[in-house]
Image (cartoon, rainbow, N blue to C red):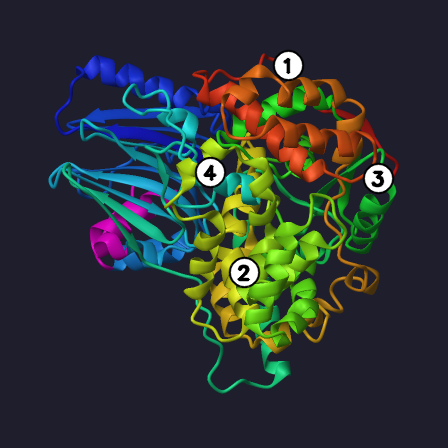
Amino acid sequence: MCGIAGFVEHTPTRGAEERAALLDRMCRVIAHRGPDEQGAEVRGAAALGMRRLSIIDLAGGHQPMSGCDPALTLVFNGEIYNFRELQRDLESRGHQFKTHSDTEAIVHAYEEFGAACVEHLRGMFAFALWDESKRELFVARDRAGKKPLYYSLTQSGALVFGSELKSLLLHPEVGRGIDLEALDAYVTFGYVPDPLSIFEGVRKLPPGHTLTFDGSSVSVEQYWDFPMETDAAPRDEEEYVEELRALLDEAVRVRLVADVPLGAFLSGGVDSSAVVGLMARHTPQPVKTFSIGFREDSFDELRYARVAARHFATDHHEFIVTPDICQVVDELVWHFDEPFADSSAIPTHAVSKLARGHVKVVLSGDGGDELFAGYTRYVVERQRRLFDRVPRPVRRGLMEPLSRALPHGAWGRNYIYNGAQDTVGRFVNSLSIFTSLNKRLLYTEEFRRSLAGRLTATERFVQIASRANANDPLAAMLYLDSKTYLPGDILTKVDRMSMAVSLEARVPLLDHKLIEFAARVPSALKMRGLETKYLFKRAVRGLVPDEILDRPKQGFGVPVARWINEELRERMRDTLASRSAAARGYFDPRHVGRLLGEHERGRRDQSTALWALFMLELWHRAYADGATDAPEAGRGCAHLEAAPV
């Protein structure tokens, strides 16, 4: 696991030494992603650098790396799980390997297959490959978006890229103008979805895409997408169960290859428990597992993790985390680079920090909810599908205007507005922190005018859902979540928080073979009535304890509502009511004050909305206002207290 950074300037304005110094700064700012080693090469028009977290072939595997063709130079972030099989195939075609690393397999695969090399890779990756003979840069990102990749084409025609946005911002030609569509998307959903970035001159390479830069233009091509076509002739349920069991076992097994200690995050949910159970089958020693909880919510959160730990006889490590929340938020802002409002980043960071004290690699259970319909929002949408029976003219001509006419805080206002939308629009509305209805009160008139004529966040998501080519509403929702929430929130959170402490996180449930299988499964087997994850639970019953399988769905409990009214009360109000926040011109200070007052008085829980606004303003101060410096040393470290197991 590593971090990469670099740039290509076909008409350099800097000398070789100056370019090398710039590349060095771009790499050092992401040293947390790879504390073991730094590699860099300035070659012709290209400057390629990386930070290495040594996992496989510790003595070899140094980057940048070349293969048989000395004109090719690669920097790579990720893990390729089928590299040994790929190496044998390539050797049979005449390729000669110098190392035992998965990095070299990519170089030779590119020599053999060109851009189609990505179709032969099984794993998580973001890499950049410079071809000196063609004077061309080839960049690729993995299918699900486990590893990040930002890029910017500057006004002078240079292409700048990196694993984290903070590397790009060190390049003098990358600007910091705010992308208003991205800002609107963040306010709506709490993260900036691909391919947008919060800065208008920077983009994210979407999952399943490649980028080619020839010095004059950037070409972005899609090589893979979440397939949403179910089997034309659905098979017997038992056949699906057996195939799923085999795929799950294989996905976990291939991710156990490492030359360093590994373990697993264990939340006590179905997904993480299944991953740990399968790990236990393939490892001779007890699996090292890691769980955390908050003092305010520790009993319910940790109870099921203990059940799984005892059942699988793991080497279990469990802690109660009591963060100095006023300092933790600054560290989160710096690591995410873009505004990010998912408060579960706090426990993710804490459990990563705990695990890093024992192992260098962990497996996590992320991805199962998007593949097999595990979120409660799918249940809510199925229950609200009754609104589809109401004629559209009534919904749009009566219900929606009524919701707009009702004052803020009126009983049923948001529910009526939600019910007035079409199926996908209703689902997108339910995902929103600030809906189109409530942004009318939040946004200033000036900000609304600046957004006029642009694609709204809601319209963007509705368009994505339409690409699913599925008449089945659940399939469209799963596709939408897999293209937006999964890479933009879940995988971003796991990557940044694990990499913040130099920990590699592997996600077996997002093995692309498993994804392609899940796409073929009929929706009726993913969600049976109002029971979520029906097929997945059937497949792991007998492996995972019934007490966990039959527990109610529950996310990680983060006591943000209490923090806002206690530890963060003064800082929250000072930040959101500050002159700098008002001067940005995005939000009506009166409405922000109204939200604060409602929450502080206990009239209405506005914690999600306030947290999003708070993290946005802190992000502006850390990045948009010109700085990229890390928080002060020693700040932001959560306090861990041993808890009885």
Amino acid under label 4? Answer: Arg
Are there few (<14), some (14-19), or many (20+) residues within 10 Å of tag 1?
few
Asked which quadrant contains residue 352, the reply is top right
Distance between mark 3 and mark 2 Cα atoms: 36 Å
Do the residues under discs 1 and 3 have CB atoms within 8 angstroms? no
* Residue 243, above or below 122: below
Depicted 182 relative to depicted 637: above or below: below
Give the number of the mark in front: 4 or 2: 4
Q: Residue at x 40, y 48 (%)?
A: 455
Identify the residue position indicated by label 3 in the image.
298
* Among numbered discs 3 and 2, the one appearing first in the sequence: 3
Callout 2 secondary element: helix
On the image, the x and y values in percent for residue 38 come to: 39, 24
Q: Say which of marks 2 and 1 sits in front.
A: 2
How many angstroms separate mark 4 from mark 2 (CA)? Answer: 20 Å
Q: Which residues are magenta?
A: 93-116
* N-terminal label among 3 and 4: 3
- Identify residue for label 2: 425
Left or right? Give the position of 313 relative to 574. right
Give percent across and percent down for residue 465: 47, 62
Residue 280 visible in the shown view: no
Find disc 4 in the rendering and name its residue: 448
* Mark in front: 3 vs 2: 2
Q: CA distance from mark 2 to mark 1?
A: 45 Å
Q: Assign a secondary structure to mark 1.
A: loop
**Quick one: quadrant of the C terminus?**
top right
Choose the circle earlier in sequence order: 1 or 3. 3
> For the residues carrying marks 3 and 4, which lies nearer the camera in this image?
4
Give the label on residue 557, or none: none
